[in-house]
Image: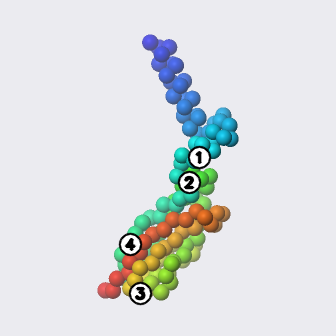
Amino acid sequence: MLSLVRILTAWCVGLSLLGCGAGVSDATTDTIKADCTLWSIRVTPASGNLHPGDTVTVSATVNQCGGYPPSAIVRWRSSDTVTAVVDASGGLVRARASGAATIIATVVADTTIRGAMALVVSPR
């Protein structure tokens, strides 16, 4: 019985190492990475409702699976600067006028990696 436990433990450890890419050929590593959600940023909060003059600070977490650390540098922009503006490096959003805007985070090292927040600005 003890040897069966050892065999199962060794098997589980082997699978764990395989999942991390240790000792795996490049082709297998590519397959493992393909199973991950690559190229994504989680923006928090994902949506918001503000009034003109209100502010909110957004943050971004870069998906580690794509090879970028969670602390990867992102730049922020607004899809509609009449409705809302955002500090490019700090993520401070300021509502300006009624309407809808998307606040977009982009990884500086790879501008194809983006995440967004949906924002609605309503009159008071």
Comes first in the chain, label 1 or label 4: 1
- Above or below residue 81? Residue 110 is above
* Residue designated by label 3: 97
Where does the image place residue 105, in percent across and percent down from the top left? Answer: 54, 68
* Viewer-side label of 2, 4: 2
* Viewer-side label of 1, 4: 1
Is disc 4 placed on a helix, strand or loop?
strand
The amino acid sitting under disc 3 is Ala
| Colouring scheme applied when the structure was drawn | rainbow
Can the viewer see residue 33?
yes
Comes first in the chain, label 3 or label 4: 4
* Residue designated by label 4: 48
Q: How many neighbours does mark 1 have within 10 angstroms: few (below 14), some (14-19), or many (20 or more)?
A: some
Measure how far apart labels 1 and 2 are at the Cα level: 8 Å
Whether residues under marks 1 and 2 lie with C-beta atoms below 8 angstroms apart, the answer is yes
Whether residues under marks 2 and 4 lie with C-beta atoms below 8 angstroms apart, the answer is no
Which of the image's four quarters has the N terminus? top left
Measure how far apart labels 2 and 4 are at the Cα level: 25 Å
* Residue designated by label 1: 33
* Viewer-side label of 1, 3: 1
Comes first in the chain, label 2 or label 4: 2
Is disc 1 placed on a helix, strand or loop?
helix
Whether residues under marks 1 and 4 lie with C-beta atoms below 8 angstroms apart, the answer is no
Whether residues under marks 3 and 4 lie with C-beta atoms below 8 angstroms apart, the answer is no
Where does the image place residue 49, in percent across and percent down from the top left? Answer: 36, 75
Residue 14: quadrant of the picture: top right
* Residue designated by label 2: 38
Residue closest to the eye, 57 or 76: 76
* Residue drawn 42% across the image and 66% down it: 46
Is disc 2 placed on a helix, strand or loop?
loop
